[in-house]
Image (spheres, helix red, strand yellow):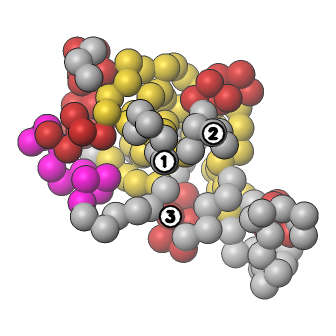
Amino acid sequence: MAYWLLKTEPDTFSIDTLKQQKVSCWEGVRNYQARNMMRDGMKVGDKAFIYHSSCKDVGVVGIAEVVKEAYPDHFQFDPESHYFDPKSTPDNPRWIMVDVAYRQHLDYVSLARIKANPALEDMPLVKRGNRLSIMPLTECQWLEIIAMSESKGR
């Protein structure tokens, strides 16, 4: 099993939206490095933190699980979609998505707390210039954030 961090803007798609939907496609990834991680790394059963970004309370808010591995992101073929890519074709799709299922809310773990934790200094999220929407985590990083959530400190 691998561990991931999935960034989302809660005004667009939040942990509450995922809870309501139960399972959702994780669409709209338009970065080749993030796409390759989804395509080559994400497997059924992998766990992912849902991370709210571009909002007042930036941080980890919940857990999802990968329930379907990479398949073509159908929004890339839809001219009405914000994610439309005219250079992508059904025979040669550029973009993929995975399906994730809601597992649980966590007590919020802020970005500030993550950055202040020496055990997380190598986490991609806290590295300067890393703006990917999908990031791999080590098991130690995963467990540290779980422990931080359980400690309920903000």
Residue type, numbered disc 2: Asp
Q: Extreme left residue here?
A: 118
Residue at screen point 55% across, 70% down? 31
| Residue 154 location, quadrant | top left
- For residue 1, above or below residue 126: above
Residue at screen point 61% across, 68% down? 30
Q: CA distance from mark 3 to mark 2?
A: 21 Å
- Identify the residue position indicated by label 2 in the image: 11
Closer to viewer: mark 1 or mark 3: 1
The tally of labels here is: 3
Does the residue at mark 1 contact the one at mark 2 (Cβ under 8 Å)?
A: yes
The residue carrying pointer 3 sits among few (fewer than 14), some (14 to 19) or many (20 or more) residues within 10 Å by Cα, namely some
The magenta segment is 117-127
Q: Position of residue 103 (x, y in %)?
A: 55, 23
**Which image quarter holds the N terminus?**
top left
Q: Secondary structure at mark 1?
A: loop
Q: Position of residue 65 (x, y in %)?
A: 54, 34
Residue 34: mark in rendering: 3
